[in-house]
Amino acid sequence: MEKSRAIPNIYDTSVDVYQRKYIKYFSEDLTDKASISVFKALMTKDIVTIEDCLKDLSNTLNNFTLLVGLCCHIIEEERLYENTEFGVSYLRYAKHLFDDLNISTSTLSASKIMVENYKAYFKPLKKAGFKLMRNSNKLLHLSEALENHQEEEVYTRIVEDTYSNFRDWALRKNIAKSHQPEPDVRVDAEIKGDKLLIDGKNILNFPKGLPKDMKEMIKKDLQTLFSIREGGNLPYIVNTYGKGEQSAINNFLKQYRSSK
């Protein structure tokens, strides 16, 4: 008789670190043969073995989107791509996933959002009785739901509503008054030696020997962040895989604000 394929006790402190950091969130709900194979591949911490699983999954993405997201989330978080020809850039590695494994940008983005939201809100989701099977797509809109509505109602609806009802409700603001964002206020940023000054104040000390282009990138990013806050607005950082996605987000914001 074939032995059980059960995953070891995930709460045992002696088990594999990937089980404790990642797999424990999914192993209770994902118990099929494909999921267990992915968990075993992830525990090897070997990117070639993990990619072999991704290749198999990419042929049936509709069924295994969560597993794709989990693989990619671990590859990014544990920086496994640094041991490949793609070096220290996850974006270069992600392009390899698009081109060589035929995983679309939209699929990868959605799968990672679902995995990251499930991990981030795991305890309240489980307390509410949320089950991954046939519900995972709702996780795409969990952050918006929590931003726009009362937390207790969010967790009730994500369990009980259909996907389309939850999506539409999550994106509908539940506040009496909305307003247009104020324009960003320009702040001055300057690099002096190993110091970054924002409006004349020393904000950051760079480590010795940091390349000039890295300093300039950090200066630009922090200058933008301070400009947004000075304008009374709320900055929000999101991963994108190119200027196309960035343009799509900007266009969506313009349409969203014009409808208010």
Image: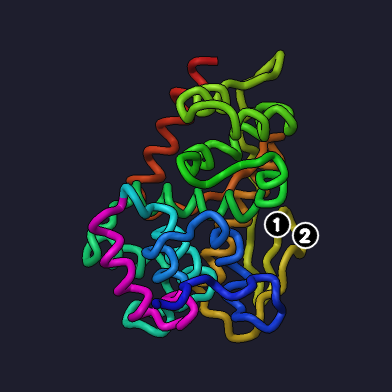
User: Residue 76: x percent and y percent?
Assistant: 48, 68
The residue at 63%/49% (across/down) is: 225
On whether residue 196 falls in the magenta region, the answer is no
Q: Quadrant of the N terminus?
A: bottom left
The boundaries of the magenta stretch are 40-61
**Residue at the spot of label 1:** 198
Apparent side of residue 134 relative to residue 10 in the rendered image (left or right): left
Q: Badge 2: few (under 14), some or many (20 or more) residues near its Cα, within 10 Å?
A: few
Residue marked by disc 2: 201
Which residue appears at 27% of the width and 59% of the height?
58
Residue 111, horizontal then vertical, whole percent = 43, 51
Residue 113: image location, x then y, percent: 50, 49
Dot 2 lies on which element? strand
Is the residue under label 2 in contact with that under label 1 (CB below 8 Å)? yes
The rendered magenta stretch, by its main secondary structure, is classed as helix
Q: Would residue 242 be seen by someone viewing this image from the given angle?
A: no
Query: Which of 174 and 157 lies nearest the eye of the viewer?
Result: 157
Question: Residue at 26% across / 67% down in the picture?
Answer: 55
Among the 4 quarters of the image, the one containing residue 48: bottom left
Looking at the image, the residue that sits furthest to the right is 201
> Does 55 sit above or below residue 85?
above
Q: CA distance from mark 1 to mark 2?
A: 5 Å
Which residue is at the front of the view, 153 or 97? Answer: 153
Residue 133 placement (x, y as % from top left): 48, 45
Answer yes or no: is residue 105 visible: yes
